[in-house]
Structure formats: C-alpha cells, structure tokens
Amino acid sequence: MASYVRGEGILRVTGELLTDDLGELIAQGAWLLDSDRAELTLDLEALEPIDSSFIGVLAQLGADARARSKTLVIRATGRVADMLSWAGLHRVVTLHISAAPVGA
C-alpha cells in the first residue's frame, strides 16, 4: 500500500503502489494540480517498483498539468526511473532521475 505526504506544490509517494491504489493516486494527483504553483513535483524516489498500469495515470497527470500551463516534475530512482524512461514519460513531464533513493 502506498503512503502520500503533501507539501507546498509537492506530493511524495512512498511504499508500494498496487492496482487498488489507482483511484487514490488519481485523487492525490488532482490535489497536486490544484496547487497555486507553476512547477509541481511528484516525488517517487521512495516508491517501490510500479507496474505499467500506473504509467497512463502519470502521463495523464502530466498532460493535465500542461493544459493548466504548469510543469510537472517527477523525481524517481532505480527501477521506477527506468520504467518511466522506457515508457517515454519524458515527453509529457520533466523527469529527474536520481542515482540512489533519498536517505540511502
């Protein structure tokens, strides 16, 4: 199960995203889009590997941010970063790839 920590223009997702978490991820993403900030950050650095069903949700979040004239930055590392890169998500969001998880 995933956990969400909200900050000013940032949403940090930790743990493991399961298929049952799709709805919550969409709701949390909507909260992030409602921020007054022009640059929004979705921090996935402490997230365990995701399956491909989440790629579409993240791509839609990026497209929604762009439609609101906002920039979505996704921070990721390891296998999550690899999956996002392979999926071509950099076409709709800014990807910041870290060599190691924060605190590792």
Image: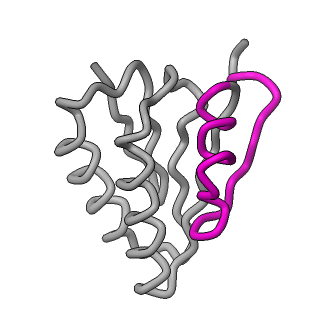
- The residue that appears at 63% across and 44% down in the rendered structure is 75
- The single residue placed furthest to the top in the displayed view is 104
x then y, percent, for residue 94: 67, 62
Q: Quick check: 67 above or below 84?
A: below
Place of residue 62 in the rendered image (x, y in percent of width and height, measured from the top left): 48, 67
Q: Dividing the picture into quarters, in which one does residue 56 lie? A: bottom left
**Is 23 rendered above or below residue 71?**
above
Left or right: where 61 falls relative to 93: left
In magenta segment, residue 41: no
Q: Nearer the viewer, residue 4 or 52?
A: 52
Q: Considering the image in quadrants, where does the C terminus appear?
A: top right
Q: Is residue 67 left or right of residue 98?
A: left
In-image side of 96 versus 48 (left or right): right
Q: Quadrant of the N terminus?
A: top left
Residue 8 relative to residue 2: left or right:
right
Residue at the extreme right: 99
Residue for point 38% across, 36% down: 5
Q: Nearer the viewer, residue 41 or 82?
A: 82
| Magenta residues, start to end | 79-101
Identify the residue shown where x is 28% and y is 25%: 18
